[in-house]
């Protein structure tokens, strides 16, 4: 089977996953306690008695349900949601009184910028550290790098964020730490997210490179008198990158999750903070939209990893 | 490998020794909390609010004058409990699914594993968040949510190991003398796939503690005045300018605990290598 067919199959599988995810989200939101219309009416004090006691205008309540389509049977609601979603219409937010798409459009660029910068920082730092550790294997520099890497993996990102805010924001006053707006605003969030990812990537780069450096073809390359740098960077690194690419792809998913925390701590707009607010507000359409988006992003990143595989190692044949 | 020689090898590795030492201290402190903690973790003392670290208060005090050192010690109880229970839930359900899928194979395997794939498509924290929506906030629900989020990775690992073990001669032998499926799974397959699962579970406790603390940090888990590490860090964040210690120490406690668990996990894997190299790929950083 050719690469194109493999990709087509992957894409199809991705569509199935996205469908499954959308169905599960839809299901979850329909069995959970709490009536969203009830909540909307209470929160916006529509139909509330001036004295503060909440009572409901039954007619208003029914009107709202009809307008939001919540009076229809479950399967009708789901198929309506799907057919509209395919046309890019994810419905109206219950709370913000805007379309879900417009909310996502406003927030997505911030998250993409954060995720891409963090992933790039993690890959750059992680691969560099991993290569250094592998070259100086079992020396103190290797031990140091690996201790740092384990610490990076283990740090709760919310804590790392607080430490960065404290040290670089409050004590040293080097970077702003609330909101977005300039490149300086990006430094601390990117460092927070990137450091953890770098730890995972550094560990894997090291172990993979150490393994490759023990292979016969590396000995051959050395035996024919190639300088060490050429051996490591030209022959070994490329072959060692295969598992690293997988993990970078996996990190993307973890990173998406990480944005939830980082965006909250740094008071940034973005898909993560949008998701948290929507979940807390029981804003069905926004939650659905965001989770669907996350699932699609995850499927796409896996697809990119698969393609990167072939580019790195032409021996791989898909079957 | 005997238990004695195993522990010797474990403790000879610096990471294994450091991890074991810190975790033993943590477990000890959690068990003996009422005897070690110098103050009651929940009794406010407005007179000494936001006092910096000193002899009287090793880690300072919070907004209500409660001793942070005592709260951090009691927090260890909660975090350990949450991590272990959550992983137990995930391991029990996940390993059962993996065993069933791997042993019987076919359509059942396909359906179960595709379900696991869909679950894996969610970033873990988002899956846990969704569970919290259904179950409502709270510490117990967080254990369940984090446990559910751990199911697919346990299922995958158990299924993979089951596939290789079920073809082995002793399983074949048991089958040929007429043993039925359940005893074969429980008596012959499970013990032989247990080692990688135990290592994975150890690593997962750290991840679970992190996820649970993160959810508490977002305000979805423990409620004040519970001395939960994530919650303490979240509350302390608001007084960071005036009193860094309120937020920094609980976070440091989580970080050290998870570092220790990871060091221990690495050491375990090195000792039992090379069979469990594949574990690295199943390992994912949580938030």
Image: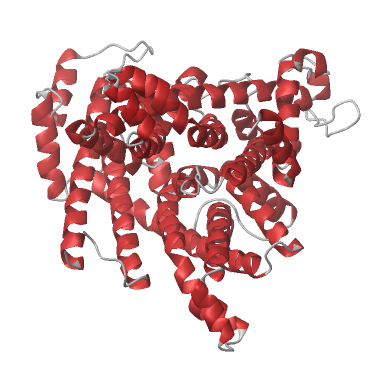
Find the residue positioned furthest to the bottom.
Answer: A225
Based on the displayed image, in which of its 4 quarters is residue A265 positioned?
top right
Residue A263 in the image: above or below residue B234 = below
Q: Quadrant of the N terminus of chain B?
A: top right
User: Is B124 left or right of A207, judged from the image as shown?
Assistant: left
Residue B260 in the image: above or below residue A115 = above
**At 56% from the left edge and 59% from the top edge, which residue is drawn?**
A207
| Percent coordinates x, y for residue B203 in the rendering | 55, 37
| Percent coordinates x, y for residue A290 in the rendering | 31, 43
Between B25 and B42, the one lying in front of the other is: B25
Find the residue positioned furthest to the right.
Answer: B55
Based on the displayed image, in which of its 4 quarters is residue A195 positioned?
bottom right
| Percent coordinates x, y for residue A202 in the rendering | 57, 59
> How many badges with numbers are in the image?
0
Between A233 and B48, the one lying in front of the other is: A233
Query: Does residue B63 appear anywhere in the picture?
Result: no
**At 34% from the left edge and 23% from the top edge, which residue is drawn?**
B174
User: Is B170 left or right of A172, judged from the image as shown?
Assistant: left
Query: Does residue A247 appear anywhere in the picture?
Result: yes
């Amino acid at each position: 089977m050719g690469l194109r067919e493999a990709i087509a199959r992957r894409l199809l599988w991705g569509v199935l996953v996205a469908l499954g995810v959308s169905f599960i989200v839809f299901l979850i939101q329909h069995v959970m306690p709490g009536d969203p219309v009830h909540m909307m009416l209470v929160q916006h004090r529509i139909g509330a008695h001036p004295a503060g006691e909440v009572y409901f205008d039954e007619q208003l309540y029914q009107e709202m349900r009809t307008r939001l389509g919540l009076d229809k049977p479950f399967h009708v609601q789901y198929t309506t949601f799907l057919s509209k979603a395919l046309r890019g219409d994810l419905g109206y937010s219950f709370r913000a009184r805007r379309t879900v798409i417009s909310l996502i459009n406003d927030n997505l660029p911030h998250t993409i910028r954060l995720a891409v910068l963090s992933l790039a920082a993690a890959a750059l730092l992680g691969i560099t550290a991993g290569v250094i550790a592998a070259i100086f294997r079992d020396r103190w520099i290797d031990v140091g790098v690996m201790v740092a890497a384990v610490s990076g993996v283990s740090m709760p990102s919310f804590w790392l964020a607080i430490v960065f805010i404290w040290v670089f924001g409050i004590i040293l006053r080097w970077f702003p730490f609330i909101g977005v707006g300039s490149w300086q605003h990006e430094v601390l969030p990117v460092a927070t997210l990137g450091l953890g990812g770098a730890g995972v990537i550094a560990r894997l780069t090291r172990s993979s490179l150490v393994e490759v450096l023990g292979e016969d073809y590396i000995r051959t390359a050395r035996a024919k008198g190639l300088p060490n740098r050429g051996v490591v960077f030209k022959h070994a690194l490329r072959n060692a990158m295969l598992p690293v690419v997988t993990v970078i792809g996996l990190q993307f998913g973890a990173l998406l999750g990480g944005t939830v925390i980082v965006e909250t701590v740094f008071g940034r707009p973005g898909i993560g903070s949008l998701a948290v607010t929507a979940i807390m507000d029981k804003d069905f359409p926004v939650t659905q939209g965001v989770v669907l988006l996350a699932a699609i992003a995850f499927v796409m990143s896996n697809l990119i990893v698969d393609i990167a595989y072939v580019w790195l190692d032409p021996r791989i044949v898909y079957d | 490998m005997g238990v004695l020689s195993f522990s010797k090898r474990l403790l000879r590795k610096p990471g294994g020794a450091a991890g074991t030492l810190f975790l033993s201290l943590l477990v000890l402190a959690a068990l003996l909390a009422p005897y070690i903690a110098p103050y009651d973790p929940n009794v406010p003392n407005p007179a000494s609010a936001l006092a910096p670290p000193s002899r009287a208060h090793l880690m300072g005090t919070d907004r209500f004058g409660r001793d942070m050192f005592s709260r951090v010690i009691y927090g260890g109880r909660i975090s350990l409990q949450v991590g272990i229970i959550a992983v137990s839930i995930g391991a029990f359900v996940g390993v059962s699914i993996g065993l069933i899928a791997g042993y019987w194979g076919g359509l059942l395997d396909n359906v179960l594993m595709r379900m696991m794939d869909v679950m894996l498509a969610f970033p873990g924290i988002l899956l846990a968040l969704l569970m919290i929506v259904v179950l409502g906030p709270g510490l117990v629900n967080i254990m369940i949510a984090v446990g559910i989020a751990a199911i697919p990775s346990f299922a995958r690992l158990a299924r993979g190991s089951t596939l290789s073990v079920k073809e082995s001669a002793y399983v074949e032998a048991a089958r040929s003398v007429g043993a039925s499926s359940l005893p074969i799974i429980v008596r012959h397959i499970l013990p032989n796939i247990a080692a990688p699962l135990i290592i994975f579970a150890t690593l997962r406790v750290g991840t679970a503690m992190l996820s649970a603390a993160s959810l508490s940090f977002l305000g979805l888990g423990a409620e004040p005045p519970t001395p939960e590490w994530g919650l303490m860090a979240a509350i302390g964040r608001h007084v960071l300018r005036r009193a860094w210690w309120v937020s920094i120490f609980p976070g440091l406690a989580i970080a050290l605990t998870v570092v220790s668990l990871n060091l221990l996990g690495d050491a375990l894997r090195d000792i039992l290598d090379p069979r469990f190299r594949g574990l690295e790929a199943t390992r994912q950083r949580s938030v």
